[in-house]
Image (spheres, rainbow, N blue to C red):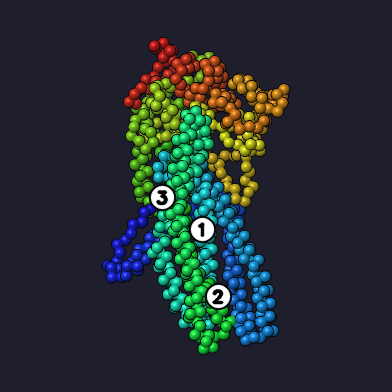
């Protein structure tokens, strides 16, 4: 995250300076601080881009070629603009001398030069926009690769200082990508103009250059004094207001049914209006400052037109320079002023770039801290690790990112302190679930949810195949039952103790609220929903043939994405139809185009998340379990919306898998489908009972 730069004491000599100069110096220091922060965050982001091993080499070469082309076209454009000033000089002189033939000849030359120059101007704009767009696409893909690995998308929710990460990696990345190239374009273009037109002005009148510099310096001091800091602050605030407003709208859409049932539209409308009012209020302040800046810029622009005439008029009247030289000097003077007044003319760009780079840089560092913590946890597990092997590039970069923002030592010390109280997890190839002295807390909290749990699921004595025992977890609401699943899956690890379990890819967790992926409508078939997440249809998988596509493999760099897509094609439709009968969802044939053809049901498309009831979604999730055949099933009240008959039928199907079931439930009758019952009590206490013993309790 970006460091807070404090103001250094004003030098003693500054006390004797005029008030305006003292204020200007302070504002310049503030702007310099923003510049340093922007530079560090930009270096952070670009270093990640260059070091990332998920970006294809052809993508980097493509971007490099675009950048070189952009620079070449920009140089030609600037040189063309300088060259055009000479025909202007010649036809102006001919016009002043009333030389008709020379005037028309030079005017024709000027028109020809313009005809050649204009296409390069258009090409310059096109290549610049193309480069910014492709850079934004590549950067977004790469950052989402980081965001979507090591479960950073989950853990970042507990970073209270990172608001709206989706907004940061979406709109803010876009503003940053375009802002970087806009700024580089301004710097390069103005530098070339400064060199070229300085030579032009030098050949005509060298004495005017000091006045030019003084005029530009006065405008810069005024702009720094009045506008820079305030506009930077407002830019950051408005980005946050906009993110909060959009997030609230999305939340209303996602929670529409609950809002309707609670009849809470009036409250949501009020909160939405409050956020909109905040956004508009800050926006009004911003546009007032921008209007003032625009007024100052216009006044300064008109003064810059008059100023060269004031400097050179006497020389013209004394016939020391010609009218053409005067016109060329005015043209060169205006170009030089634009180059020297880079701060005045680009305050909105600079303030926006500072705000966006800070927001994106903070989010990136938060994600990499999560990656670093994950790496340290992996190193702590001497005999096993998660499937997602540590990405060396990202881990190395995490330390570099921290050092760039002067957080290296603090980050390592912070992580070392955290690791002293982490639960270690060992993944095995066997169906073993063993918890040894496991105690855990909620993230970023000292509230103990469970104290020193010891649990070892052994061979069952109640099943004919003597498979591993199944476990039912019960207890009062809010005691931490679902939290135990989060600990076992590795989402939470605040606490201590040791866990041994199968690899995550061999387990299936069924949450109380089923997850139905938001596939594009043409791919959102019932078949694809049932095959999720183990199998993915090859038609709905984006191939890496795009020039900016990244080599993303979720938490497993050795995985072959096409492997599972091929497996999906091998699943027979009749097997899926049989599963639909087992989970009592054959009535969904009403969504098919041909109710007589059962197979057509599998390929019909619909917005299943809104079409299916919660009970139907829960049965669909159990259908996924029957198709994927995991080695261990974790059921977190995944039948809570079902009637008793359907709930019993679903557990009968799960038991038929011959895989150990670890369930969370409130219905006492579920104990008959399990061997053991883990009962949560208050203050982190627990007790382990045989299922029959639990059923016999009153």
**Left or right placement of residue 180 versus residue 31 in this view:** right
Query: Which residue is disc 1 drawn over?
Result: 180
**Disc 1 versus disc 3: distance between alpha carbons?**
19 Å
Say if 316 sits above or below 112 in the image: below
| Mark 2 / mark 1, whichever is N-terminal | 1
Q: Please tell me whether mark 2 or mark 3 is closer to you in this view.
A: 2
Q: Residues within 10 Å of mark 3 (few under 14, many from 20)?
A: many
Give the percent coordinates (x, y) of residue 204: 53, 82
Residue sitting at 61 percent across and 75 percent down?
84
Nearer the observer, 51 or 350: 350
| Mark 1 / mark 3, whichever is N-terminal | 3
Query: Which residue is disc 2 drawn over?
Result: 331
Pointers 2 and 1 in contact (C-beta within 8 Å): no
Q: Residues within 10 Å of mark 2 (few under 14, many from 20)?
A: many
The quarter of the rendered structure image containing the C terminus is top left
Q: Residues within 10 Å of mark 1 (few under 14, many from 20)?
A: some
Give the percent coordinates (x, y) of residue 218: 41, 71
| Mark 2 / mark 3, whichever is N-terminal | 3
Mark 3: secondary structure: loop
User: Mark number for residue 274?
Assistant: none
**Left or right placement of residue 169 versus residue 481 in this view:** right
Residue sitting at 50 percent across and 78 percent down?
308
Mark 1: secondary structure: helix
Query: Which residue is disc 3 drawn over?
Result: 1
Mark 2: secondary structure: helix
**Disc 2 versus disc 1: distance between alpha carbons?**
28 Å
Say if 254 sits above or below 53 in the image: above
């Amino acid at each position: 995250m970006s460091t807070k730069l404090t103001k250094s004491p004003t030098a003693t000599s500054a006390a004797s300076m005029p008030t305006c100069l003292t204020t200007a110096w302070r504002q310049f220091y503030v702007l310099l601080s923003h510049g340093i922060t922007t530079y560090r965050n930009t270096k952070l982001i670009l270093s990640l881009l260059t070091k990332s091993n998920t970006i294809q080499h052809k993508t980097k070469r493509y971007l490099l070629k675009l950048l070189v082309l952009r620079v070449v076209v920009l140089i030609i454009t600037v040189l063309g603009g300088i060259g055009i000033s000479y025909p202007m000089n010649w036809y102006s002189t001919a016009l002043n001398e009333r030389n008709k033939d020379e005037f028309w000849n030079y005017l024709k030359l000027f028109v020809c030069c313009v005809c050649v120059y204009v296409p390069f101007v258009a090409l310059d704009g096109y290549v610049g926009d193309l480069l910014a767009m492709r850079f934004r696409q590549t950067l977004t893909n790469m950052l989402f690769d980081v965001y979507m690995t090591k479960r950073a998308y989950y853990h970042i929710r507990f970073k209270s200082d990172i608001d709206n990460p989706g907004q940061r990696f979406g709109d803010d990345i876009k503003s940053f990508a375009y802002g970087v190239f806009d700024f580089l374009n301004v710097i390069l273009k103005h530098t070339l103009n400064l060199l070229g037109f300085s030579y032009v002005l030098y050949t005509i009148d060298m004495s005017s250059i000091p006045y030019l510099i003084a005029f530009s310096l006065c405008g810069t001091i005024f702009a720094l004094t009045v506008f820079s800091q305030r506009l930077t602050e407002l830019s950051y605030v408005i980005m946050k207001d906009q993110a909060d407003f959009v997030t609230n709208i999305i939340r209303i859409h996602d929670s529409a049914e609950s809002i309707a049932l609670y009849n809470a539209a009036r409250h949501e409308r009020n909160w939405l209006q409050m956020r909109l009012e905040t956004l508009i209020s800050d926006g009004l302040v911003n546009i007032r400052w921008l209007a003032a800046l625009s007024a100052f810029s216009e006044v300064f622009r008109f003064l810059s037109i008059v100023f060269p005439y004031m400097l050179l008029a006497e020389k013209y009247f004394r016939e020391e320079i010609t009218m053409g030289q005067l016109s060329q000097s005015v043209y060169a003077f205006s170009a030089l002023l634009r180059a020297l007044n880079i701060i005045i003319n680009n305050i909105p760009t600079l303030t926006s770039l500072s705000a966006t780079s800070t927001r994106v840089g903070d989010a990136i560092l938060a994600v990499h801290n999560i990656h670093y913590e994950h790496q340290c946890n992996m190193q702590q597990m001497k005999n096993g690790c998660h499937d997602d092997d540590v990405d060396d590039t990202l881990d190395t970069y995490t330390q570099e990112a921290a050092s760039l923002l002067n957080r290296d030592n603090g980050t390592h010390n912070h992580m070392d302190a955290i690791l002293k109280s982490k639960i270690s997890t060992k993944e095995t190839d066997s169906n073993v679930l063993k918890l040894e002295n496991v105690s855990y807390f909620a993230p970023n909290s000292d509230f103990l949810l469970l104290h020193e749990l010891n649990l070892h699921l052994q061979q069952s004595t109640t099943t004919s195949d003597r498979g591993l025992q199944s476990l039912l977890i019960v207890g009062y609401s809010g005691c931490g039952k679902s939290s135990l699943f989060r600990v076992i899956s590795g989402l939470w690890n605040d606490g201590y103790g040791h866990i041994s379990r199968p690899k995550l890819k061999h387990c299936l967790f069924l949450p109380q609220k089923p997850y139905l992926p938001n596939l594009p409508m043409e791919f959102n078939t019932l078949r694809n929903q049932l095959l999720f997440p183990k199998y993915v249809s090859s038609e709905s998988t984006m191939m890496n043939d795009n020039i900016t596509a990244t080599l993303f493999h979720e938490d497993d760099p050795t995985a072959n994405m096409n492997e599972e897509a091929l497996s999906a094609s091998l699943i027979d439709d009749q097997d899926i139809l049989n599963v639909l009968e087992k989970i009592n969802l054959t009535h969904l044939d009403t969504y098919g185009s041909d109710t007589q053809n059962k197979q057509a049901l599998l390929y019909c498309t619909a917005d299943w998340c809104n079409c299916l009831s919660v009970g139907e979604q829960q049965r669909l999730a159990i259908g996924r379990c029957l198709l994927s055949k995991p080695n261990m099933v974790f059921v977190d009240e995944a039948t809570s919306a079902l009637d008793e008959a359907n709930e019993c039928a679903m557990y009968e199907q799960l038991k038929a898998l011959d895989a150990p079931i670890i369930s969370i439930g409130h219905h006492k009758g579920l104990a008959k489908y399990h061997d053991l019952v883990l009962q949560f009590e208050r203050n982190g206490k627990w007790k382990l009972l045989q299922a029959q013993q639990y059923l016999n309790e009153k």
